[in-house]
């Protein structure tokens, strides 16, 4: 079965090409969040399709496309001196190419006190990359729009 085209791709829709369960955990932890925690923008962006959308759902902030996602991460990396994600609990569904991840975030604003968040993300993959990401934060939105 071939990958779905952009025209008929649907979040969790039929026709997905299942990947091995460890792939989902690896892209979330060893590629994406490791890139975020180490402020490695290229590593982070290499997890997204060019037309990906990242939505911070609790504030309805939408970053549409890899350029907008890049700007958002540039701002995040500039505004916070330390970022750490851990204590992961994952639930992947290879049949729909999705993974839900619950985790702790410890993040320190420049010159400020460390903040603790308990977040959950839902990742939808297409062609082995994140195509839609929904972020649910336990506190204020830290994923502001950057200067695109």
Image: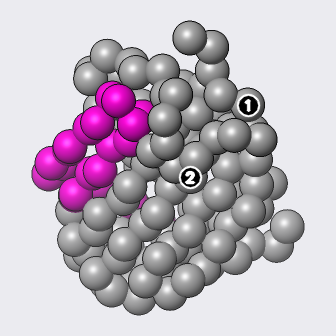
Residue designated by label 2:
132
Q: In this view of the protein, can residue 30 be seen by the observer?
A: no
Question: Quadrant location of the N terminus?
Answer: top right
Q: Which residues are magenta?
A: 81-103
Instruction: Provide residue 109's location: percent of width, then percent of height.
Output: 44, 78
Closer to us: 85 or 79 = 85
Closer to us: 143 or 108 = 143
Q: How is the image coloured?
A: one colour
Q: In this view of the protein, can residue 144 be seen by the observer?
A: yes
Task: Give the residue drawn at x 15%, y 48%.
Answer: 89
Q: Nearer the viewer, mark 2 or mark 1?
A: 1
Q: Above or below — where is 116 with respect to 72?
A: below
Q: Is residue 87 magenta?
A: yes
Task: Give the residue drawn at x 56%, y 68%.
Answer: 55
Instruction: Provide residue 90's location: percent of width, then percent of height.
Output: 20, 44
Instruction: Provide residue 85's location: percent of width, then percent of height.
Output: 29, 54
Q: Above or below — where is 5 with respect to 8?
A: above
* Rendered image quadrant of residue 95: top left
Closer to us: 122 or 15 = 15
Question: Quadrant location of the C terminus?
Answer: bottom right
The numbered disc on residue 5 is 1
User: Label 2 vs label 1: CA separation?
Assistant: 15 Å
Q: Above or below — where is 68 with respect to 49?
A: below
In the rendered image, the residue lying farthest to the top is 1
Dot 2 falls on a residue whose secondary structure is strand
Badge 1 local density, few (<14 within 10 Å), some, or many (20+)? Answer: few
* Rendered image quadrant of residue 145: bottom right
Q: Mark 2 or 1 closer to N-term?
A: 1
Q: Above or below — where is 131 with respect to 146?
A: above
The overriding secondary structure of the stretch rendered in magenta is strand
């Amino acid at each position: 079965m071939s990958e779905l085209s952009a025209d008929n791709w649907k979040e969790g829709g039929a026709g997905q090409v299942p990947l091995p369960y460890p792939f989902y955990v690896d892209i979330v932890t060893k590629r994406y969040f490791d890139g975020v925690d180490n402020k490695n923008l290229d590593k982070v962006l290499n997890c997204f399709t060019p037309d990906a959308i990242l939505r911070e759902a609790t504030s309805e902030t939408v970053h549409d496309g890899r350029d907008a996602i890049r700007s958002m991460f540039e701002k995040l990396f500039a505004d916070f001196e330390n970022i750490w994600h851990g204590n992961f609990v994952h639930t992947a569904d290879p049949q729909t190419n999705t993974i839900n991840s619950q985790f702790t975030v410890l993040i320190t604003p420049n010159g400020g006190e460390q903040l603790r968040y308990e977040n959950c993300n839902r990742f939808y993959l297409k062609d082995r990359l994140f195509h839609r990401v929904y972020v649910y934060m336990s506190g204020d939105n830290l994923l502001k729009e950057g200067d695109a």
